[in-house]
Image: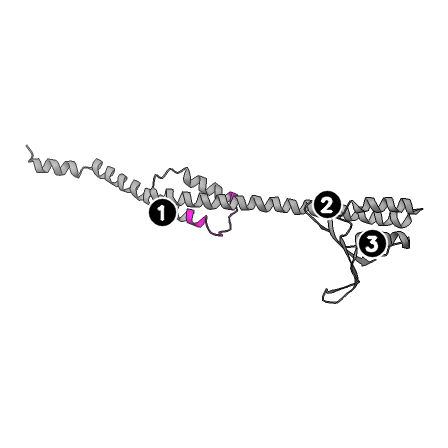
């Protein structure tokens, strides 16, 4: 009969026990590496690493779904989630602003076309009554009849402009009516929040 100590050594050193111990060590090592990789990846998501916000959110979801059950990983998941939420809101606001500016630009373009058509109608009106009617219609494009009209006399090589004495849109439309012609082209318009023209700049055609 074998001594007890030899029996215990045989049990401890048996291939099965050694295999289980090795497997446990490997599992722990993999867990540690996964946690370290996850934290490294999460930190990178808060930098300008070339990924789009959509790609960053996908990577965040991937790490979250690993369910690593680690306090530090959970802390970084929270930090990155807050960061991505802020970035997503900022991008949404930028898209809305871009759409607003595009709509405003399109509206300004249409207002400019309408204004030039009114200039032509006022100048070619057969009588004063019809000219006055077109003037009233044209004024509806403006925030008020006192909107300033800036007439460019000349432009220097560096882009600086020299202006004639300022006038108002009402006076300028009356001028077109009296002269029965117009010689100025409107520059891109400045609109107010209601989409009305708040300033008009004219250059010689």
In three-dimensional space, the C-alpha distance between marks 3 and 2, rounded to whole angstroms, equals 24 Å
Q: Residues within 10 Å of mark 2 (few under 14, many from 20)?
A: some
Lower position in the chain sequence, tag 3 or tag 2: 2
Q: Main secondary structure of the magenta part?
A: loop
In three-dimensional space, the C-alpha distance between marks 1 and 2, rounded to whole angstroms, equals 54 Å
Asked where in the image residue 15 lies, by quadrant, the reply is top left
SS under mark 2: helix
Q: Which residue is mark 3?
A: 171
Would residue 203 be found to the left or right of residue 28 on screen? right
Residue 181 locus on image (x, y percent): 89, 54
**Identity of the residue furthest to the bottom in this view:** 157
Q: Give the number of the disc on residue 107.
A: 2
Which colour assignment does the render follow? one colour
Residue 44 locus on image (x, y percent): 44, 50
SS under mark 3: helix
Would residue 70 be found to the left or right of residue 152 on screen? left
SS under mark 1: helix
């Amino acid at each position: 009969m074998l001594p007890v100590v030899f029996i215990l050594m045989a049990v401890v050193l048996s291939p099965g026990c050694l295999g289980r111990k090795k497997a446990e060590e490997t599992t722990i090592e993999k867990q540690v590496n996964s946690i370290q990789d996850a934290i490294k990846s999460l930190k990178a998501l808060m930098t300008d690493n070339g990924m789009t916000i959509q790609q960053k959110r996908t990577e965040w979801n991937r790490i979250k779904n690993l369910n690593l059950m680690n306090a530090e990983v959970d802390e970084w998941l929270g930090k990155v989630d807050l960061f991505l939420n802020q970035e997503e809101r900022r991008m949404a606001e930028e898209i809305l602003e871009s759409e607003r500016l595009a709509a405003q630009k399109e509206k300004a373009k249409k207002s400019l076309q309408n204004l030039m058509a009114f200039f032509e109608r006022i100048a070619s009106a057969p009588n004063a009554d019809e000219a006055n009617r077109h003037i009233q219609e044209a004024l509806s494009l403006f925030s008020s009849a006192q909107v300033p009209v800036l007439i460019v006399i000349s432009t220097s090589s560096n882009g600086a402009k020299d202006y004639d004495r300022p006038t108002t849109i009402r006076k300028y439309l009356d001028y077109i009516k009296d002269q029965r012609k117009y010689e100025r082209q409107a520059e891109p318009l400045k609109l107010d929040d209601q989409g009305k023209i708040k300033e008009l700049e004219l250059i010689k055609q």
